């Protein structure tokens, strides 16, 4: 009787290496999502108005890691209720708010970075009412969309410095026509890196 053929050790080693390599390939993309380089932040939630209308709010900002002195961020939104104006701003995340958990969005975001001059670009109002200041107030695009830029810096107000004394985020919220309405609150946290860390 012929003894069973044994697999050569080299072939076995190659097989083990192949499996190991495949395992690493599966893990490395996940590890690569944590990075010190500027990245894109996203937020979304589905809301239902008092009239029963449903809206899937989506907010996107890039980059969300800025140099220590600040920088410009591109912001896009979609799915918003064009019948309700919103403010897009850079604000302190209130105590008790857990980003990504809308049930905790019970407090008005703030304080927010001051200055609404068109050249400053630290906040915007999005509305279809046709009122407001050109360059600061923008109309919704089709599908409750908007796109703009914000110029951000870490010091929101006296004693309110992002990453040092407070948490900060790009936010949307209902404008002054519905200040107490929390349906449109969304948060994308922004971080300021130490000098030289962001290139």
Image (cartoon, rainbow, N blue to C red):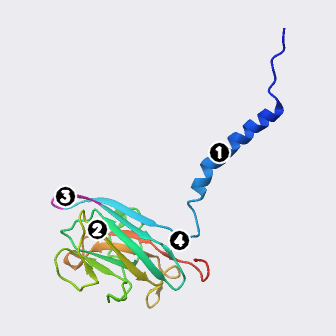
Q: Residues within 10 Å of mark 4 (few under 14, many from 20)?
A: some
Rounded to the nearest angstrom, the CA distance separating label 4 from label 3 is 36 Å
Q: Is residue 10 left or right of residue 129?
A: right
Q: Which residue is mark 4?
A: 38
Q: Are marks 4 and 3 in contact (CB under 8 Å)?
A: no
Q: Name the element at disc 4.
A: loop
Rounded to the nearest angstrom, the CA distance separating label 2 from label 4 is 26 Å
Q: Is residue 106 left or right of residue 153?
A: left
Q: Is residue 50 above or below residue 109?
A: above
Q: Nearer the viewer, residue 54 or 167?
A: 54
Q: Are marks 1 and 2 in contact (CB under 8 Å)?
A: no
| Residue 93 seen from this side | no
Magenta residue span: 50-56
Q: Which residue is mark 2?
A: 184
Q: Position of residue 118 (x, y in %)?
A: 32, 87
Q: Which residue is mark 3?
A: 53
Q: Are marks 1 and 4 in contact (CB under 8 Å)?
A: no
Rounded to the nearest angstrom, the CA distance separating label 1 from label 2 is 42 Å
Residue at image point 81% right, 17% down:
4
């Amino acid at each position: 009787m012929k003894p069973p053929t044994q697999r050569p050790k080299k072939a076995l080693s190659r097989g083990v290496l192949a499996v190991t390599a495949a395992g690493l390939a599966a893990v490395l993309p996940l590890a690569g999502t944590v990075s010190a380089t500027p990245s894109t932040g996203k937020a979304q939630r589905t809301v239902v108005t008092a009239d029963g209308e449903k809206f899937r709010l989506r907010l996107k900002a890039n980059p969300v890691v800025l140099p220590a002195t600040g920088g410009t961020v591109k912001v896009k939104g979609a799915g918003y209720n064009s019948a309700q104006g919103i403010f897009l701003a850079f604000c302190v995340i209130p105590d008790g708010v857990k980003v990504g958990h809308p049930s905790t969005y019970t407090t008005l975001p703030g304080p927010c970075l001051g200055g609404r001059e068109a050249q400053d670009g630290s906040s915007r109002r999005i509305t279809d009412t046709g009122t407001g200041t050109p360059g600061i107030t923008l109309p919704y695009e089709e599908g409750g969309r908007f796109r703009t830029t914000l110029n951000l810096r870490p010091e929101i107000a006296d004693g309110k410095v992002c990453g040092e004394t407070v948490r900060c985020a790009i936010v949307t919220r209902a404008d002054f026509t519905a200040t107490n309405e929390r349906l449109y609150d969304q948060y994308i946290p922004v971080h300021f890196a130490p000098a030289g860390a962001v290139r």
